[in-house]
Structures are given as C-alpha cells and as structure tokens.
Image (cartoon, helix red, strand yellow):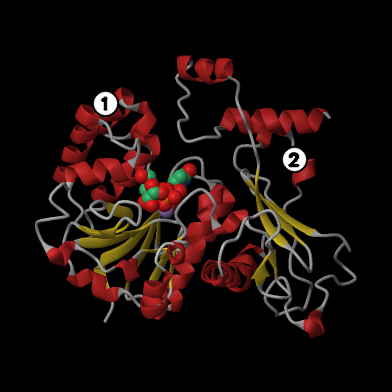
Amino acid sequence: MPVSDQAFVTLATNDVYSQGALVLGQSLRNQRATRKLVVLITPQVSSLLRVILSKVFDEVIEVNLIDSADYIHLAFLKRPELGVTLTKLHCWTLTHYSKCVFLDADTLVLANIDELFDRTEFSAAPDPGWPDCFNSGVFVFQPSLETHGLLLQHATDHGSFDGADQGLLNSFFSSWSTADINKHLPFIYNLSSNTAYTYSPAFKRFGSSVKVVHFLGPTKPWNYKYNPQTGSVLEEGSGLANQHQTSFLNLWWKIYQHSILPLYGSFRVEEEHASPGHSAGIRELCTKPAAGSSQPWPAEGPSEQTVVTDDTPPSPKGCHSEDVDLAMSVFEISIEEKVKELSPEEERRKWEEGRIDYMGKDAFARIQEKLDRFLQ
Ligand SMILES: O=c1ccn([C@@H]2O[C@H](COP(=O)(O)OP(=O)(O)O[C@H]3O[C@H](CO)[C@@H](O)[C@H](O)[C@H]3O)[C@@H](O)[C@H]2O)c(=O)[nH]1
Ligand SMILES: [Mn+2]
C-alpha cells in the first residue's frame, strides 16, 4: 500500500549530482518503492535538469540557504565551509512527511527497501572506514523543525570533525553506536562499492543480499565512460579494482542508458545561437532520437548499430546543460563536468559583492563562460 506521508529523499546541488539522483530515483521505481520520491535541489541546478528530475521524482524541492529562515542564515554565515552539509540537513524541514529515508545521490537501490520505514530516527549503517561511526549516505529520520534547529545550532557551535555532514551527524547522534541496536542498519543497506577489497569472504557470503550500493569516495559512476554496445564501463585510466565494483558500475550505467537518457530525448535547443544575455539556465541542447524510432536512446543491440538516420547529423550526439555535457556516440557515452575554476581574487570579489555561491558555479561564471565562447 502506498504511504503518502513518508518519502525517500535525496539531494543534488548541481547538474552532475543530478545524474546520480536520477539513476537512484529510477532504481527505487524499478524496485516498486511505495513511498513518495523527493529530491532537494539548490539554485545551481539548471532548468533542464529540473524538468528531467520532475519526470522521475514526485517532488523537486528547491532549498536556498541564503533565502532561508534567519536561524539557517546565521548558521551558514558563521560556518560557510559547511555549505553542502547544511543543505543535506535541510531534509529535516520536510515536515509534510512523518518519516523519511535519506539516500545519497551516489547510491543505487537493488531491491525493495520499504521495510526501512519500520525503523525510527536515527538509524544508519556503520561506516566501512570507522564502524563506530555511521555512514551518512543512507539514514532513517523524522522531519522536525526543532531537530533541524538543534542540528544547525550544533553546526554553528561545534562545526564538524570531518568538515561535512557525516562528522556533524555523528557527533549530534552520538549514542548511535551504543544505545540501540535497532538503529544499526545492516550493512546490506549501505554497501560501499569497494568493500570487497577489505573483506572479500564476507562479500562472497553476504554480497548477494545487498539492497543498496553506495559509490562513496572520489570516483563516482558518472566519472566513468560506458560502452552501450557491451554494456560495460571502460576501464582505461579509471583504476578499476575488482569485478564486483565493475558490475555495480555497469548496473548504474544500464539504468542511465535505458531509463535516463531517453528522458532527455524531447529537448532540442540550439545552444550556439543563444545570445549571451539570455544564458541563465537555458539553451540546453540535446539531439532527439531518430524520427520514427521508438527504441531507447541511443539504440542498443547489434542489429541497431547506428542511431543516426538521414535527418540527424552523422556526428556524435551531444547534450548540454549548464554544468554537464553528455557526449554520445554509438560506442561510448560519457558525462563530462565543465570545469570552471575561479581565481582567489574572483572568489573574494564574489563574497564582497554578496554573491555567495559556496557550492560551485554561479550565474556569473556561467555568463562569463558564455561570453568567452561567444567572443571566440
Ligand atoms: O557537490 C555536491 C556534493 C554532494 N552532494 C550531495 O551530498 C551527498 C554526499 O556527497 P558524496 O560525494 O556522496 O560523499 P561520499 O563520497 O559518499 O562521502 C561520505 O562523506 C560525505 C560527507 O560527510 C557524506 O555526506 C557521505 O554520506 C559519506 O558517504 C551526495 O551523494 C549528494 O547527494 C551534492 O549534491 N553536490
Ligand atoms: Mn555518497
């Protein structure tokens, strides 16, 4: 039975992490999740990605710390380095839900996990690096403005021992490791994708019952290139370690190829003709599937070796949002992050002018980039 006052919640502060959120949301749908799907986003997420996210999630909720209530604003100003952390804490403000399960955007759900709603706040699985701490990539919580305020107060007063949400949450819910074993989620609800490394017999014994895989660490599934013909990620340069990790990555990409890419198919805007003055979050370009084609995009299988027909150009297809380029050919798909480094002076000027963009690219950088491209 659907339960409408409970939700699975994730977070994406930019277009790149939105790709992860999309695959996660789709994986929950594939496993017939019976709760609402919610994604929290920040103003940096482009208009294109908002539309695509709304095709997978029941609610796409923008959170903007700058415009938020005074107590959030204050906590943020005192601890600007905790920007993304404070954003994750925003999930406690979803008070139209009575209970939620938070999942990082870099997790993938392999089985139905509705039973997590039988647990209570604060439940989480051990962190593989230090098992007396929980990992904050999967947790059960109860939205409450009071708890949210206390968490922010804690952040303001004590910061975070790891500079991010996991340290903060562990010191706030500090009795987790000793008080109540029911609040320890089994590791199968938050299996780090590279754990087979450290205890492979356990993986052999329990690995098949895994329900949630977490691609924690610096290299995310979207950092790999994928061959849609073979259905596997390309290993060159990626330092792939073991076959379990590879098969989880392939699963992620399979969902991306078959269920997420087709969502982009209906967008077609000519970016290169955009005037630089109209660049705020628009002008995404994405070529359509070949006319008359009902196949997933790009087409798959040996009998459909080409996705190009007469009315589409015979070059690799591309799709852009403000922060990501999707490079696509018959043999390779990749999600490329546009790198936009600001000099320290530029960063300072932004702060002085009150254009606080602690999470990365802001409109100015985008407009500048467009201008540069336009003038070239
Ligand atoms: O630029 C960013 C960075 C993070 N996130 C969101 O925040 C989550 C956490 O970041 P992630 O890159 O997944 O961190 P991990 O590699 O998983 O590292 C660990 O450390 C983080 C910081 O403490 C915790 O949030 C994670 O749960 C924990 O697994 C992501 O999944 C996203 O939902 C964004 O939206 N944009
Ligand atoms: Mn994560």
**SS assignment at label 2:** loop
The relative height of residue 57 versus residue 147 in the rendered view (above or below) is below
Quadrant of the drawing holding the N terminus:
bottom left
Q: Nearer the viewer, residue 71 or 324?
A: 324
Q: Residue furthest bottom?
A: 303
Residue 290, image x, y percentages = 79, 72
Q: Nearer the viewer, residue 206 or 360?
A: 206
**Is disc 2 surrounded by few (<14), some (14 to 19) or many (20+) residues within 10 Å?**
some
At 26% across and 53% down in the image, what residue appears? Answer: 94
Quadrant of the drawing holding the C terminus:
top right
In the rendered structure, which amino acid carries the disc numbered 2?
Answer: Ala
**SS assignment at label 1:** helix
The reply to whether callout 1 and callout 2 are in contact (CB within 8 Å) is no
At 54% across and 55% down in the image, what residue appears? Answer: 220
**In this rendering, which labeled residue sits more in front, label 1 or label 2?**
1
Q: How many marks?
A: 2
> On the image, numbered disc 1 is attached to which residue?
74
Please give left or right for residue 14 compared with residue 258 in the image.
Answer: left
Please give left or right for residue 306 compared with residue 346 in the image.
Answer: right
Q: Nearer the viewer, residue 136 or 87?
A: 136
Q: Report, in whole angstroms, how far the alpha carbon at label 1 lies from the one at label 2.
A: 39 Å
First in residue order: circle 1 vs circle 2: 1
**Is disc 1 surrounded by few (<14), some (14 to 19) or many (20+) residues within 10 Å?**
some
Residue 331, image x, y percentages = 78, 68
Please give left or right for residue 180 compared with residue 372 in the image.
Answer: left
Residue 156 falls in image quadrant: top left
> On the image, numbered disc 2 is attached to which residue?
274
Residue 359, image x, y percentages = 47, 35
**Does any atom of ligand 1 lie closer than 8 Å to the CB of label 1?**
no
Residue 57 visible: yes
Residue 210 visible: no
